[in-house]
Image (tube, rainbow, N blue to C red):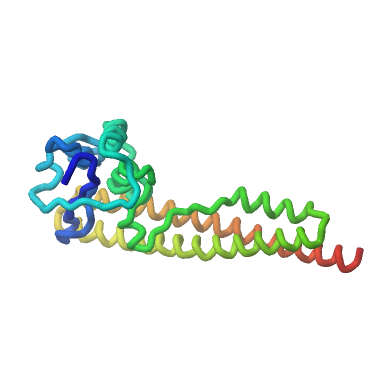
């Protein structure tokens, strides 16, 4: 391990010793900046190496392109005291990867099938409006086809994300139940928080899916109007 490295240790949850990776940034002086959950709220804190590792093996994450060590540590230090932890959008790996590469990503979540919603709904709406205003038949039909293809791609991605979010709701509910049986109220509360977050995401994605369907119907209407306009000028 070296100064500026993104490092992680395996942590336990509900009796599973290697349930997830806990990430941080090695400061090079036997201290680590990471999201610490020691208190009531998860806080980005600078702790000793031992406090971070809990006596477990520490491993580093390799990146093809990343900042130099001094920049990585400076970026980590700039967020000390932050209390905006979110499992799906701002967890310990999101933070450490952002410090190291500038990308707010979590490879763990990606490996579980979770993909953040990156769909540009306003962009789709603007594209749909352009098809209704376009006077050239070739350009109008090309825009219609592009909008239709983009919406179809977005819909498939969003359906997968919505299904994963709903599955996460069930998973975290079960984790909370197991934690309560084992008298781990702290883990139960954390799991229920994850459940609520997953449910909100599932609801948001369902609403976005409804918007996509509405836009698809609008495009189909525009297609019919355009085809009629150019067949019967």
Query: Residue pushed farthest left?
Result: 55
Point out residue 29 in the picture as x, y percentages from the top left corner.
14, 35
Quarter of image, res 229: bottom right
- Judged left or right of residue 40, residue 137 is right
The number of callouts visible is 0
116, above or below 149, in the image = above
- Judged left or right of residue 150, residue 182 is left
* Quadrant occupied by the C terminus: bottom right
232, above or below 86, in the image = below
Whether residue 82 is visible, yes or no, is no
Point out residue 186 in the picture as x, y percentages from the top left corner.
20, 48
Query: Residue pushed farthest bottom?
Result: 231
**Front position in the image: 128 or 98:** 98
| Residue name at image x 19 percent, y 37 percent | 27
Quarter of image, res 210: bottom right
| Residue name at image x 36 percent, y 50 percent | 105
| Residue name at image x 52 percent, y 65 percent | 156
Point out residue 68 in the picture as x, y percentages from the top left corner.
29, 39
**Front position in the image: 101 or 162:** 101
| Residue name at image x 28 percent, y 46 percent | 92
Whether residue 22 is visible, yes or no, is yes
- Judged left or right of residue 2, residue 107 is right
Point out residue 197 in the picture as x, y percentages from the top left corner.
38, 50
């Amino acid at each position: 391990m070296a100064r500026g490295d993104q490092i992680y240790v395996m942590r336990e949850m509900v009796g599973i010793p290697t349930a997830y990776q806990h990430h941080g940034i090695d400061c090079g002086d036997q201290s680590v900046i990471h999201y610490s959950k020691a208190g009531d709220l998860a806080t980005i804190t600078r702790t000793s190496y031992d406090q971070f590792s809990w006596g477990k093996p520490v491993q580093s994450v390799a990146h093809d392109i990343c900042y130099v060590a001094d920049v990585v540590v400076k970026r980590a230090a700039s967020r000390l005291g932050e209390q905006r932890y979110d499992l799906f959008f701002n967890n310990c790996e999101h933070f450490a990867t952002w410090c190291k590469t500038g990308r707010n990503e979590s490879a763990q979540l990606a490996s579980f099938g979770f993909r953040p919603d990156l769909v540009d709904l306003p962009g789709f709406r603007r594209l749909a409006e352009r098809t209704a205003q376009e006077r050239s038949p070739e350009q109008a039909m090309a825009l219609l086809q592009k909008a239709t293809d983009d919406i179809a791609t977005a819909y498939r991605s969003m359906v997968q994300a919505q299904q994963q979010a709903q599955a996460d709701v069930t998973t975290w509910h079960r984790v909370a139940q197991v934690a309560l049986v084992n008298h781990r109220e702290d883990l139960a509360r954390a799991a229920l928080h994850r459940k609520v977050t997953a449910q909100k995401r599932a609801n948001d994605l369902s609403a976005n899916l409804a918007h996509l369907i509405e836009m698809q119907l609008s495009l189909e209407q525009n297609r019919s109007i355009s085809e009629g306009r150019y067949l019967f000028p």
